[in-house]
Image (cartoon, grey):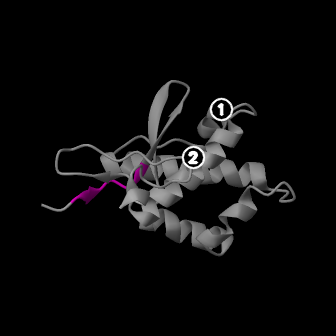
Amino acid sequence: MSALKNGGYPVTLNGKEYSLLFSLNALDEIQDRFGGYDKLTEVFNDSNPDWIKQTKWLLTLLINEGLLSEDEDAKLLTETQVGRLINVGNLPDIQNSIFAAFATGTSGDGDITEDGEGQEPDKEGEAKGARES
């Protein structure tokens, strides 16, 4: 049996775990909004006057994709609700989690093996032990 790819990256906000998922739907919306996923670094650029709104929108999109992947009838979060989960203290962690979620969703990190155990990505978004192979 081959490994199943979860694609989601876990993040805990206000004591609740969410899965950030860069699904094809999310990538499509990112392309429409920013011109491509390669523009993600521009979202977090301090010279971007809309970086706060764009970060909130992006996090909402990824959380909701994660919720929908688990339950098509899930209650989705609004940007206002997600905005309450972000503060100046956790903003750098949020940004790092978004990049890690992108790495997980696009490179296959976070594979779920036959025994059900996943490989947790390190800070660079690479699955632990993957560099040794």
Extent of the magenta region? 3-8
Q: Residue at x 23, y 51 (%)?
A: 113
Q: Is residue 93 shown left or right of residue 74? A: right
Residue at x 57% of width, y 43% of height: 78
**Mark 1 vs mark 2: which is more N-terminal?**
1
- Please tell me whether mark 1 or mark 2 is closer to you in this view: 2
User: Can you name the residue that lies furthest to the front here?
Assistant: 132
Q: Residue furthest top?
A: 15
Please identify the residue farthest to the bottom as the structure is shown.
Answer: 35
Residue 68 covered by magenta stretch? no
Is 14 placed left or right of 34 in the picture?
left
Q: Is residue 6 magenta?
A: yes
> Badge 1: how crowded within 10 Å, few (<14), some, or many (20+)?
few
Residue linked to disc 1: 84
The residue that disc 2 covers is 97
The reply to whether discs 1 and 2 touch (Cβ–Cβ < 8 Å) is no
Q: Secondary structure at mark 1?
A: helix
Type of amino acid at the residue the image marks with label 1: Arg
Q: Amino acid at mark 2?
A: Ser
- Quarter of the rendering containing residue 1: bottom left
Q: Residue at x 57, y 46 (%)?
A: 97
Residue appearing at x 68%, y 51% in the figure: 55
Q: Nearer the viewer, residue 73 or 26?
A: 26
The Cα atoms of the two marked residues, 1 and 2, are separated by: 17 Å
